[in-house]
Amino acid sequence: MTKWYLLFLIHLIIPYNGFSQTCCSGGVPLSNNIGGLPASTKNTWQFSLAGDLNTLSTLKEGSQELDDDSRQRKTFSALLKSSYSFTDRFFVEGLFSWVTQERIITQQAGFTDYDKTQGIGDAVLLVNYTYLNKGSLKLTGGIGPKLPTGASDLKDENGLTLNADLQPGSGAWDGIFLHRIQFTNTFRKSQNYFINFTYRYAGVNNKYLGSEQYQFGNEVQLISGIADQFLIGSSLFSFGLNARYRSVNKDQFNSQTLPNTGGQWLFIMPVAGWHIRSNIILGINGELPLYAHVDGTQLSPTYRINGSIYYSFSKMKNK
Amino acid sequence: MASTMNHSVKYFLLAVVISSCSDPVNPGNNGTNANSNDLPWSIPKNEVRDGGPGKDGIPSLTNPVMISAIEANYLSNDALVVGFKSGNDMRAYPHSILDWHEIINDKVGNDEIAVIYCPLTGTATGWGRVINGVTTTFGVSGLLYNSNVIPYDRLTNSNWSQIRLDCVNGTLREEKAQNFHLVETTWKTWKTMYPETKVVSTLTGFNRNYSNYPYGDYRTNNGSFLFPYTPADNRLPNKERVLGVITPDKIPAAKVYRFNSFDGEIIVKHDNFKSIPLVIAGSKAHNFIVAFERKTELSGLLNFTPTDITQDPLPTIMQDNEGNKWNIFGEAVSGPRQGQKLIQVSSFIGYWFSWGAFYPDAEIYE
C-alpha cells in the first residue's frame, strides 16, 4: 500500500506546462497531468482535485533571457482526475479541467493592460494497461484522446475574439500516448524511481477565427523522478525530486509554421505529500526552469506551483 | 512580492471552485489606458483580431536616441529603412527596429510624427500626432485588421487602421490621419542621398536583438500568414512589395505600382488614376518608388523626365518641362519653382496581399 501511495505522489505531482500555445502561452496543463494516477488494484476508484498556477514572465530569445518584465501570463487550472481499475492491470482515467488565463501588460508610464478568460478546458481520456509487472519493475502503456471540450472562440468583453493562447480549449482532438517505467523496492524499500514518456499528436482546429486552421505543435515529454517516504512525528510524509524535459514543435496556422512558437525546456520539481489517512493525501509541488530554448522570442515559464488532494476507495474492500 | 503571494493564495483558493460555462471575464484596464473597443467600429468588428501580445505588449518608442550614419554599424547596406525629411532634419527608421516596436513617436524639425510600421503587411506610414491641438503619442493596440496593425492614440484611446489611414473606433472614429510623405528604401540608398541623416540607435531602452528578424520566413514565403485577411487577390505574389496610391475619396480606391516597372537607375512614369494626374518615380536598382501629383499648389500640370544620376546624384530624381529639378520628397531643388513641393498623395509601400484585402479590385499599373 505504501508503494501505491508513493507511486501516486510521483505521478500526481508531475509537471504541467501543457499544451503549447503560441508565443506566450500560459498553457493548459493537461498532458502533464495525464498519467498522474497510478495503476491500482481491481475495482479501485481514485480521485484527485488539483489547483495549478503556471506563471510566465521570463522573456527569452532562444536560450537568452531578455531584460524585460513588461509581459506576464498566468494560467490557473483546476484539475479533476479520476480513474477506475477494471483489473489489476487494466484501468481507465479521465482528466477534466477548468482554466483561467490572464494576460498582463505593464508598459508606457506604468499603465496596465489586462485580459482574462476562463472556462471549461479540454478533457483527456486514457486507457492504460500494465503489460509487465515483475519484481521491482512495472511497465504501463496508455493511449487516448484529448477531447475539445473547452471553448476556443472566446471573445473579450468588447466582443473581439481572443488569440488561440488565451482560449481555454484548443478546439482540436489530439492523440496522447503514454508509457511509464516504474522501479520500486530498490535501494530502500520505500524508495521509488520512475520515467514517464508522453507524446501528444496535436489535431487541427478547423474553426479557428471562424474558418481558419490552427494546430498547436506536437509535444514530447520525458519525466524522471525519485521519491521516498519518511515518518515525521506520527505523520507519514513523502518527498521527491523530478526532472522534466519538454519539447514542442512550432504551431501551424493554415498549415504554415508560426514563428515564435515551440521550443525545449528542462525543469526541476521538488514534490511533497502528507498522508492524512491511508487513502487521503495532500500534495504540493513547485517547478522551476533549469534550461529553456525557445524558437524566436517568447515568454517562457518562470515558475509553477501545484496543490492537490487525493482520495481513493475500493469497491472490493467496501464489500 | 507580496502582491504575487496574494495572487498565488487567491488562485489556490479558486482551485476548488469549479464553475460552469466558458466566460471571458470583464477585465478592463488599470491606469488611464482604458480601451474604447466597446464603441462602434467602422470596420467589421468580427474581423478585428487579438494579435496575442496585448495592448502595448509590443512597445512603441518615443523620442528615440538618434545616432549618425557612421555610427549605425548595425545596419547592412541592403537593410530597409523608412526615411523622413523635415527641412534639413533627415531621419531614418530601420525596419529592424520597427519590426520590434512598430511605432516610433518622434519630433523631426517642427513635425510631430509617428512612424508606424506593420511587419505583417510591410507598410510604413508617417502620421501627425497633434490631435485636436494636443500633441500625443501612438501605441500598438495589440489588435489587427486584415493582418494590419491597429495603432491607438494615447489622447483618446481611439483605434486607427494604418492602411485605411483613418480612425475606426473610439471618439475620433472616421477622422483621417494626417499623412506625412515617407520614403522607404535601402540603408545604402538613404545614406547616399542624405549622409548627414540621423538614424535610430539600438539603445532603445528595450532588450531586443535587433539583428534578428522576428517573423521567420514571413517576408518571403507567399503562403505564410499569422492572421487571416479577406479578400485574397492572387493577381500578384502575396508578399511582393508594391507602392500603393490611395485616392482621397469617401470610398477610397487604390492603384499599385510594381518595382518591375522601374527596372533601371531612375524611371519616371505619368499616370492618371481616378482623375488624379500622377507622376511616379522609381528605381529597382536603388529600391524606391515614390508618387506625387504632377503639380504644385502654384503650378499647372508638369511633364517629368528622369534626371541623369551621374550628373544629378540622388536625392534628385527628376526634372520637368519648366527646367525644375525635383528630389525624392517632391521638393523642387533647382529651377524657377525651387522651394515648391509637388502635391502629396497618400502612398506607401506594402505587401501586395494587403492592398488586395483593403482595396478590393485595386488597379495594377502595367
Image: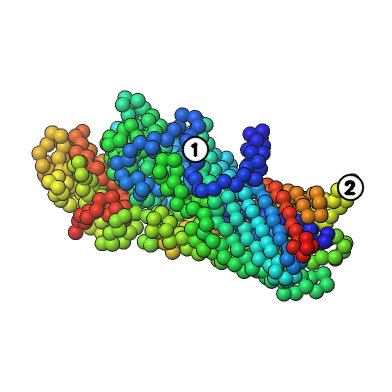
For the point 38% across and 29% down, the residue is: B155
Q: Is residue A55 visible?
A: no
Residue B112 is situated, as x and y percent measured from the top left of the image, at 35, 31
Q: Is residue B236 left or right of residue A70?
A: left
Q: Amino acid at mark 1?
A: Pro
Q: Depth-wise, is mark 2 or mark 1 nearer the camera?
A: 2
Rate crowding at label 1 as few (under 14), some (14 to 19) or many (20 or more) other CA atoms within 10 Å.
Answer: some
Q: Amino acid at mark 2?
A: Ser
Residue marked by disc 2: A234
CB under 8 Å between discs 2 and 1: no
Q: Which mark is residue B195?
A: none
Camera-nearest residue between A254 and A293: A254
- Please, what secondary structure does the residue beneath circle 2 have? loop
Residue B165 is situated, as x and y percent measured from the top left of the image, at 29, 41
- The quarter of the image holding the N terminus of chain B is top right
Q: State the separation of the CA atoms marked 2 and 1.
A: 47 Å
Most distant residue in the right direction: A233
For the point 40% across and 59% down, the residue is: A212
